[in-house]
């Protein structure tokens, strides 16, 4: 196990001694600009997320993810995450999600 500690200046030496590596937060952000200039504004398109439940827990998550990707890909869907018996998919519009739901129902 490796412990990486990001800390303030007044952190106890006992806590620092427990960490594999330690970094002073103020030193890390010293060169980060405080007020970055925005050179271009990009319009973000709205998305629709769908939660899929009751997935098989006796199958590896990679296999479940691959199957969900095959079912939702032609509807514009992306598998965001698979955890235990649930998954989260993202679609460009609610219409795309509805079409995918019809394919995946059952």
Image (cartoon, grey):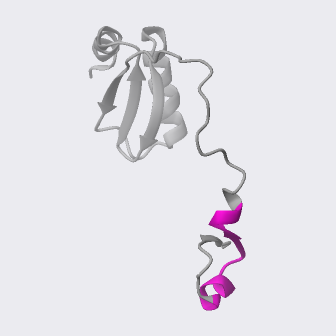
**Which residue is the extreme one toward the bottom?**
14
Instruction: Depth check: give the residue in front, 60 or 98.
Output: 98
Looking at the rendering, in which quadrant would you find the N terminus?
Answer: bottom right
When the figure is inspected, residue 85 is found, relative to residue 40, above or below; the finding is below
Residue located 46% across and 33% down the image: 80
Q: Is residue 10 above or below residue 71?
A: below
- Residue at image location 66% in from the left, 56% down from the top: 29
Q: Position of residue 98 (x, y in %)?
A: 28, 12
Quadrant location of the C terminus? Answer: top left
Q: Pinpoint residue 25: horizontal percent, then vertical percent.
A: 63, 65
Magenta stretch: helix, strand or loop mostly:
helix
Q: Which residues are magenta?
A: 13-27
Tell me if 47 is positioned left or right of 98 in this view.
Answer: right
Q: Residue at x 66, y 79 (%)?
A: 19
Q: Position of residue 62 (x, y in %)?
A: 54, 38
Identity of the residue drawn at 46% across and 38% down = 81
Name the residue nearer the viewer: 7 or 79.
Answer: 7
State the count of labels. Answer: 0
**Residue 96 is covered by the magenta coloring:** no
Camera-nearest residue between 80 and 67:
80
Q: Quadrant of residue 71?
A: top left
Who is closer to the viewer here, 27 or 73? 27
| Residue 26 vertical position relative to residue 63 in the rendered view, above or below | below
The x and y percentages for residue 26 are 65, 64
Viewed as shown, does residue 57 lie left or right of 34?
left
């Amino acid at each position: 196990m490796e412990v990486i500690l990001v800390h303030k200046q007044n952190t106890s030496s006992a806590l620092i001694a427990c960490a594999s590596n330690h970094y002073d937060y103020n030193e890390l952000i010293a060169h980060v600009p405080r007020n970055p200039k925005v050179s271009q504004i990009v319009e973000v398109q709205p998305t629709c997320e769908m939660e899929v439940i009751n997935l098989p827990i006796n199958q590896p998550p990679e296999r479940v993810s691959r199957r969900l990707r095959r079912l939702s890909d032609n509807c514009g869907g992306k598998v965001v995450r698979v955890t235990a018996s649930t998954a989260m998919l993202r679609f460009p519009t609610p219409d795309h999600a509805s079409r995918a739901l019809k394919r995946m129902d059952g």
